Image (cartoon, rainbow, N blue to C red):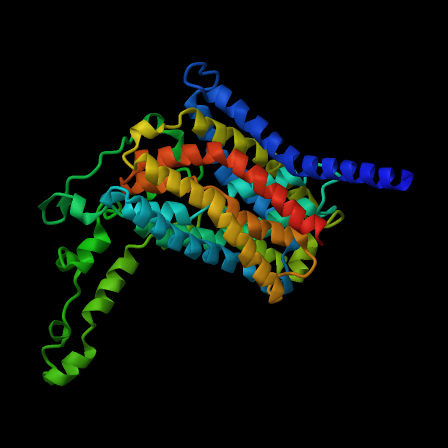
Amino acid sequence: MELVYAQSDANIRYRGEYVSTAVLPLLKLLSLTVFGIILANPKTKLVPKSTFRLLSKLVFALFLPCTIFIHLGESITAKNFILWWFIPVNVILSTAIGCVLGYLVAIICRPPPEFFRFTIIVTAFGNTGNLPLAIVGSVCHSNNNPFGPDCHRTGVAYVSFAQWVAALLVCTLVYHMMEPPLEYYEVVAEGGEIQEQVATNDLSRPLLVEAEWPGMEENETVHCKTPFIAKVFTSLSVSQTSIPEPDILEDEEQPPRSPKSIRCLAEPQMVRRIRIVAEQTPVRHILQPPMLATLLAFIVGMVPPVKSMVYGDDVPLAFITDSLDMMASPLVPAVMLVLGGMLAEGRGPNESRLGARTTIGIIVTRLLILPLIGIGVVYLADKFNFLVHGDQMYKFVLLLQYTMPSAILFGSVASLRGYAVTEASSILFWQYILAVVSLTVYILIYFKLLLYYV
């Protein structure tokens, strides 16, 4: 009987430790977010909006690149680069599944027609950067974390390894899906439209616009706020960017070619339209500080002679990595303070034209349904030996990619494209408020699956 009581007491203590291990990291992040909400609250105005804007720029240009370079560069090798292949694939897979779910939400909830594509992409694309890094940093903050002594280094490396594919998706899929719908623009002249007006004054824009990618609006091109793809594929403005026909390019001194040869050399109309759209896709803007840090970490980490000079305690360039490590330390509190500042000026559902039914559909799908599908995907990937065997942090990061609310970056893209700015602000506000509950529940489930049933 005493043995039974002892086992029962041990189980209770274990469950208590297990619950605290899963919940305490989120409570820490919540506390930091509450500090940000209090400091940025419009009624108190303890810290001006300009300070939070500056802090977001420091995160983007300094704290995040330093974190990526220190932890990804130390962990990455040529072997690991191949071994971790499922991390970027999982980002693409989660986005594809999210697109399918978002399409179903749009069909079932029937948002206003001009927000059909917005509903799909805001359901599909989650936060793959700052928030997962904050969660990993908080989980690994204590010495008795469940993932071992290398918890923080490996966790940050795994999250950072997904950054390049996430940035590529933002500059291609998200950018084009957030294009203003052509049918809701009044064409007033060749190449001119009546556009949604977005304030250009930095201090007048909500913090949401620059919370995750400061300065994105500086990358605005002539076609950013126009329905460019729709016009190209409906032949409304192809003439503006059309290329000379092959017979015009012929040298007058050369004998004319036959009609058959001209037809062979001519670029197909569909190919030409795809090329025009590709030329206007801002892929060049991917090379921002976090991506440059990722590329530099790849180069240094996968070249052993260079890596042996940069990473380590007694290496020649240890003073540089130590300095960068100190710069990386404020990342988690800074990210959560900026998030708190964003939520402090969040916009409620009354300011959004998306509709309560669609808003609820997006939130339920993104925060509750997609993580369940993610558990199945990671389980099947593990069964097929696609994952790193025995590495629970690897699986935890993969599961987090399905659990995150929509990327804060939607605020920047919406402002850049002049489309659904208010709707993006409203849906992100409610997602991040309710994600406190959903993240707590799912991290408890993940810890149970990864650590209890190992």
Residue at position x 40%, y 33% in the image: 208
Q: Is residue 301 visible?
A: yes
Q: Is residue 101 left or right of residue 451?
A: left
Along the line of sight, which residue is nearer the eye, 17 or 249? Answer: 17
Q: Position of residue 446 (x, y in %)?
A: 62, 47
Q: Quadrant of residue 308?
A: bottom right
Residue extending farthest to the front is: 1
Residue 193 lies, with reference to residue 53, above or below; the image says: below
Q: Position of residue 307 (x, y in %)?
A: 66, 56
Residue extending farthest to the right is: 2
Q: Which quadrant: the C terminus? A: bottom right
Residue at position x 50%, y 36% in the image: 435
Q: Position of residue 20 (x, y in %)?
A: 69, 34
Q: Is residue 217 visible?
A: no
Q: Is residue 260 left or right of residue 67?
A: left
Along the line of sight, which residue is nearer the eye, 432 or 48? Answer: 432
Residue extending farthest to the top is: 44
Count up the numbered dots. 0
Along the line of sight, which residue is nearer the eye, 93 or 250? Answer: 93
Q: Position of residue 233 (x, y in %)?
A: 19, 59
Residue at position x 55%, y 39% in the image: 439
Q: Is residue 439 left or right of residue 211?
A: right
Q: Is residue 198 left or right of residue 169?
A: left
Q: Quadrant of residue 251?
A: bottom left
Residue 137 lies, with reference to residue 370, above or below; the image says: above
Residue 362 lies, with reference to residue 82, above or below; the image says: above
Residue at position x 51%, y 57% in the image: 90
Q: Which quadrant: the N terminus? A: top right
